[in-house]
Image (cartoon, grey):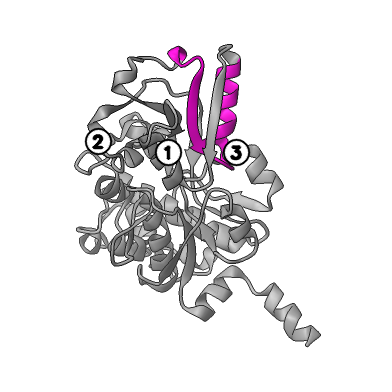
């Protein structure tokens, strides 16, 4: 028994995932554009696509993934305990989370910042006018800490009204139990869609924090860490190189050495992460590049209507910059 137990404990995440035939992905309890189920339980979103892309990289099949909805409070425990293989849940990369929880952030798939939403009839145009306000937020988040910092720094009294589940926060704000709803700006646009009268509410212009959101894995398994990291890098590099789900087959005959390496036509880069050499081809073919995922889930033509902004490629004036496959 001792030997068997030791073997099981030392199996890598990739071995475990291959043995069961799918990736277990921790997501939100329903955040439109990032991770949200439809009535049939089919999940979509920017964070969902990252998990689907990892499944495509490992299995050549983007549907080889199951989703576990997690509250902000329980998300890290679920990853630490092995309940999920990866956490892709609009989660901010901070030093303490990266160093004190036994976890590794694999990159940033959305650069965000915390904002405030108020009713238009409150007559407020700036967050600096919120002195004495009651603020609805989520427990167990950087959001709560940032509110404290911001109001304290500006010598403004305030009252926190906190709930564990995001839908509870939205419902409380919608019912008028607080003056202000605060979370990451992307979340404000997403959750506004759930309000009784979305048009009665506005997002203030102030962004009070840095919220780099990204996928998280357990520390101590570099192979799986690399798979998460390079799956995201592949989607970003594919966009930069003009490789999409629509043209990826044609691009295999490209003369561009960077494209050849990305798609596994040249070199053996998959071997270094325990995957086949067409791992990135499978990601782009099955899920798409970063631009395709962004536009389909949160972009200008979706209900969220978010522009690329800082989430554009570095070559287009944004922050997205992936190391090369070589």
Say which residue appears at 28% left-offset and 63% top-offset. 39
Span shown in magenta: 128-152
For the residue pair 286 and 261, the one nearer the viewer reads as 286
In the picture, measured across the screen, residue 85 lies left or right of residue 37, that is right
In the picture, measured across the screen, residue 76 lies left or right of residue 168, that is right
Where residue 161 sits in the image (x, y, percent)? 52, 33
Q: Is residue 293 magenta?
A: no
Query: What residue does disc 3 label?
Result: 94
Q: Are marks 1 and 3 in contact (CB under 8 Å)?
A: no
Where residue 267 sits in the image (x, y, percent)? 43, 63
Q: Are marks 2 and 3 in contact (CB under 8 Å)?
A: no
Q: Is residue 154 above or below residue 45?
A: above
Mark identifier at residue 150: none
In the picture, measured across the screen, residue 95 lies left or right of residue 61, that is right
Query: What residue does disc 2 label?
Result: 197
Q: How many marks?
A: 3
Query: What residue does disc 1 label?
Result: 172
Q: Quadrant of residue 109?
A: top left
* Label 2 packing within 10 angstroms: few (<14), some (14-19), many (20+): few
Say which residue appears at 23% left-offset and 64% top-offset. 249
- Look at the numbered disc 1 and give the secondary structure of its residue: helix
Q: Quadrant of residue 301?
A: top left
Q: Point out the tag, 2 or 3, that comes first from the N-terminus.
A: 3
């Amino acid at each position: 028994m001792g030997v068997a137990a030791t073997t099981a404990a030392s199996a890598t995440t990739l071995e475990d995932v291959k043995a069961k035939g799918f990736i277990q992905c921790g997501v939100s309890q329903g955040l439109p554009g990032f991770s949200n189920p439809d009535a049939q339980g089919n999940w979509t979103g920017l964070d969902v696509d990252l998990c689907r892309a990892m499944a495509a990289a490992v299995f050549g099949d983007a549907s080889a993934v199951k989703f576990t909805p997690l509250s902000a409070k329980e998300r890290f425990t679920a990853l630490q305990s092995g309940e999920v293989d990866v956490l892709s849940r609009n989660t901010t990369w901070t030093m303490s989370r990266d160093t004190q929880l036994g976890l590794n952030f694999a990159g940033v798939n959305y650069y965000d910042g915390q904002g405030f939403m108020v009713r238009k009839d409150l007559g407020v145009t700036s967050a600096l006018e919120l002195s004495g306000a009651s603020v609805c937020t989520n427990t167990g988040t950087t959001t709560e800490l940032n509110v404290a910092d911001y109001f304290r720094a500006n010598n403004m009294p305030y009252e926190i009204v906190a709930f564990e589940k995001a839908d509870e926060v939205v419902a409380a704000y919608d019912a008028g139990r607080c003056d202000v709803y605060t979370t990451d700006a992307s979340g404000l646009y997403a959750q506004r869609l759930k309000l009784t009268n979305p048009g009665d509410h506005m997002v203030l212009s102030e962004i009070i924090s840095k919220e780099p959101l990204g996928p998280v894995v357990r520390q101590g398994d570099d192979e799986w860490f690399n798979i998460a990291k390079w799956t995201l890098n592949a989607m970003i590099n594919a966009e930069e190189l003009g490789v999409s789900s629509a043209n990826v087959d044609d691009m295999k005959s490209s003369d561009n050495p960077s494209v050849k390496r990305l798609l596994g036509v040249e070199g053996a880069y998959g071997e270094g992460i325990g995957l086949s050499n067409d791992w990135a081809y499978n990601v782009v073919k099955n899920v798409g590049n970063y631009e395709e995922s962004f536009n389909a889930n949160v972009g200008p033509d979706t209900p969220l209507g978010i522009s690329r902004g800082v989430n554009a490629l570095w070559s287009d004036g944004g922050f997205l910059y992936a190391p090369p496959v070589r």
